[in-house]
Image: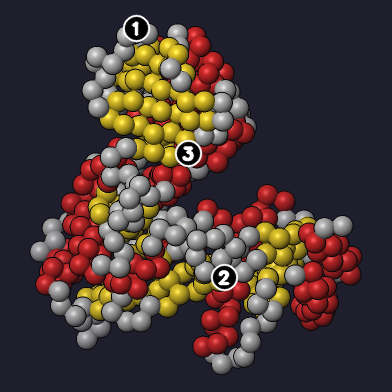
Amino acid sequence: MAIFGRIEDLGLAEVLAFVAQRPGRLTLRDASGTLSLLIGGGRVRCAFLGLDPLDAGSLILRLASIRDGEFEFAPGATDDACPRRIEIPVDRLILELTKLQDELEHHRPRLPNPAIRFRLVRDPSALTSAIPLLAQTAELLEKGANARELSERLGLPLDQARYLLFRLRLMGLVEEIRGARRAQGAGSVLGRLLRALAGGTR
Amino acid sequence: MSKQERIEQALDRLRQNMPDIRAAIVASPDGLLIAERGAGNAATRLAAMAATALGLGRRIAQTAQAGEFNELVVRGKDGYLAVFAIEGKAVLALTLPEGGNLGLLRIEAENAVKDVLEEL
Amino acid sequence: MKPHTLKIGVLGPYGAGKTTLVRTLSTIPAVSTEAPSSEGGKATTTVALDYGYLDFGSVGVHLFGTPGQARFHDVLDVVLQGALGALILVRADRPSDLPRVRELRDYVASVLEVPYLLGATHLDKERRWETAEIALFLKEREDRVLRLDPRDSGQARRALARLVELVCEEGGVRCR
């Protein structure tokens, strides 16, 4: 079963981050043509515009110019599918893409709620030079912070803080902190409910 | 002039006749903003809330056998929100600080409702 | 004897099947507060909430379905106050809804810290994502995204049971 959708709904960077987890062929169709990326091992092994192979630079520029269109991802082995490999790590593609498409407005509908808390899940040191504000926020994010807190502590406009967290999540550097408070309801009551649900009682 | 602009003008008139009014919002029954004056960033949220109030107000009026729903007022220590049905077609929500004249508001709101109804 | 009652919220984007799920689970006629929808795809949409009650005699569950659109966020806060958990519905045939579902999940899990389970609906559509793929996108364990036809009473009850089990596991409560 293929994964499909519209590029403008999920955002291209998000689509890339998601599909890169498995080998397969990613097809991007917009008004100016069809882009195919063959992915394996977290890298783009090769890419084509129509039938013409693309080099790394051309691929990045091409991706940066896509606004609206459809995507489809067909999982499957791609080991032997490339006549000439370019082997770009998808992480790097996403980084280059977000640099070129550095528009908060473009991503506005997908910015996280200011109250949602995020925590660092990877060592940020390799990327502090590439992502502005990462160095200053790393300490706060180690313990966990939301956009509102980052905004207050660092004097950032709230939207900038949200955009930063959005990009960091995209790069796999932070994840949402999910908590669960103590159960509402005593064990005996919940047990009774479980039995009732299983028993089909009315 | 577009429909939205004419409704905004009706809201302007309302605020002129009753300067106490802080925000005036007209929303669709499913919570979409149609026009507003003075609501700023809260406009989208207030529009949704007005629709919720309309929906709940209708149900309460029905259950309490009060007839067709007209108005719902939420009063807090520092001010209040009054929600008026624009027949079944839309809802008018007005916020005022504490001490406002609710009786006068009703009269002015009724006129505004008639104006807006002509545009819908 | 007064029953012990619990409360569940049913959340999800526009058209995911929340009102339907409340009606399916409820053993009393469910009550909805709806308005004609300007948004297409359905005739009406929830503007306040759907209410149903699952009556098991000595124990019962209040069911609250919330409006799906982001503009109705305030209703969510009210509904999930003191809730046992939330069922978050997602349409498998609408990948465009995934960011919205993620936002709902984040709000429920990270801000409100309410236990939750995801239910994938519309799996009967030909062009759709699989539950495993939805789970991958949302960075959830596969067993957190269930197949859920909101019209099916058996699936609905199993989903609710799984949510209760999760509450017991995560809350460190022994549910006997």
At label 1, the amino acid type is Arg
Q: Residue at x 81, y 73 (%)?
A: B118
* The image quarter in which residue C17 lies: bottom left
Please tell me whether mark 1 or mark 2 is closer to you in this view: 1
Respond whether the residues carrying marks 1 and 2 are from the same subunit. no
Dot 2, crowdedness within 10 Å: few (<14), some or many (≥20)?
A: some
Q: CA distance from mark 3 to mark 2?
A: 28 Å
Choose between C5 and A82: the one closer to the eye: A82
Query: Please, which chain is the residue tagged with disc 3 on?
Result: A
Residue A99, visible in the rendered structure: no
Check disc 3 and report the residue beneath it: A6
Where residue A84 is drawn, which disc sits there?
A: 1
Q: Secondary structure at mark 1?
A: loop
Locate residue A38, reporting x and y percent.
34, 20
Q: Residue at x 42, y 78 (%)?
A: C31
At label 2, the amino acid type is Pro
Q: CA distance from mark 3 to mark 1?
A: 29 Å
Choose between B3 and A104: the one closer to the eye: B3
Q: How is the image coloured?
A: secondary structure
Dot 3, crowdedness within 10 Å: few (<14), some or many (≥20)?
A: many
At label 3, the amino acid type is Arg
| In this picture, residue A95 sits left or right of residue A77 | right
Asked whether disc 3 touches disc 1, contact meaning CB atoms under 8 Å apart, the reply is no
Check disc 2 and report the residue beneath it: C36
